Image (cartoon, rainbow, N blue to C red):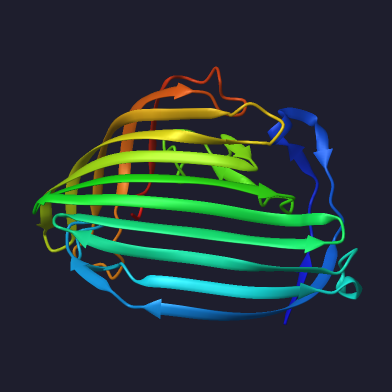
Amino acid sequence: MEVRREEYLRAPSAALNQDSIFALAPDTVYGMFSAFVEYRRSRFVRLGRFNGFTEEDQNLSDLVFVSAKLAPGGLGYRDTGVGGRVVLGSGVRAGPALLKGVVDADALFNSSGLDSGRVVATGTVAVRTAERHATFLQVSGGAMESPPPGGEFDLGFEILPRLWGPHAFVGTRSMRLTFEHRFFALDNIKDLAGVGLATFVDYGGAWFEDQDPRLGGDVGMSVFFGSPLSSLAQVNHISGGYRFGGGIGQSRASRWAFSLGSGIIF
């Protein structure tokens, strides 16, 4: 059983780009019952110079997760609803390439039909052609209906595209694509850090169902760094490049930009 209390604050509606409009949502307390079953066939590949300078286990396991839920009308919902969630994931190694994919979908239905729902699919291809080189291509897309306030897709900065500001792309429909090539130049400087170079292209965005797709992207280069002793395989980056397209309130922003943040985990 799950019991949740949600409280919201008044804030400008950035999605409408009108500072005078405020989104209001009542505080709520609700509960639901759920049960799930999961099947997993474990399969891992150990790699170095991939997401970071340290070695890591890439998860290529087969996953099937299915849950069912009951949301009684007397526990905070206007009507009694039933629904569930399905997650399917798998990966495979094919020579120098790793291929991974996952689909995550959930929905809640009541007497009026679909009350709320969300589906997101992501596919990743990673290729190691040499010890110090790694190339990544990742594509993701999703849609949702009736998300809670603040639960929409929210892209920008550390959530691609990386050279756009936070909340540059917001909505209930989303897609993103990124291509990145990393060269791990130096593994261990004074037993503290490693340094590398990367080139990248990002493209994507988010929009609401009644809007035209709001998309943007960037192309540029990064200097990334991380520790070969870290327990987490991830790098940080300083990136610069050229932006194209337009996000919320940023269509007139400078086309040249830079960012500092955590590297994407593929």
- 224, above or below 98, in the image: above
Residue 262, position as x, y percentages in the image: 37, 51
Q: Is residue 177 left or right of 120 when viewed as pictured?
A: left
Residue 156 visible in the picture = no
Q: Horizontal and vertical percent for residue 76?
A: 87, 69
Q: Is residue 73 above or below residue 212?
A: below
Q: Quadrant of residue 183?
A: top left
Residue found 60% across the figure and 46% down from its top:
153
Q: What residue do we see at 44% from left, 22% from top?
A: 244
Give the image quarter of residue 219: top left
Q: Is residue 12 above or below residue 248?
A: below
- The residue lying toward the viewer, choosing from 136 and 155, is 136
Observer able to see residue 208:
yes
Viewport quadrant of the C terminus = bottom left
Q: Is residue 132 left or right of residue 90?
A: left
* Residue 167 in the figure: left or right of residue 63: right
Q: Position of residue 124 (x, y in %)?
A: 34, 51
**Where the N terminus falls, by quadrant?**
bottom right
Name the residue located 27 percent from the left edge and 46 percent from the top edge: 136
Q: Is residue 232 left or right of residue 5?
A: left
Depth order, front residue of 70/233: 70
Residue displayed at 34% across by 58% down? 100
104 and 17: which is toward the camera: 104
Q: Residue furthest top?
A: 252
The part of the image, by quadrant, that contains residue 108 is bottom right
x and y percentages locating residue 64 in the rendered image: 47, 72
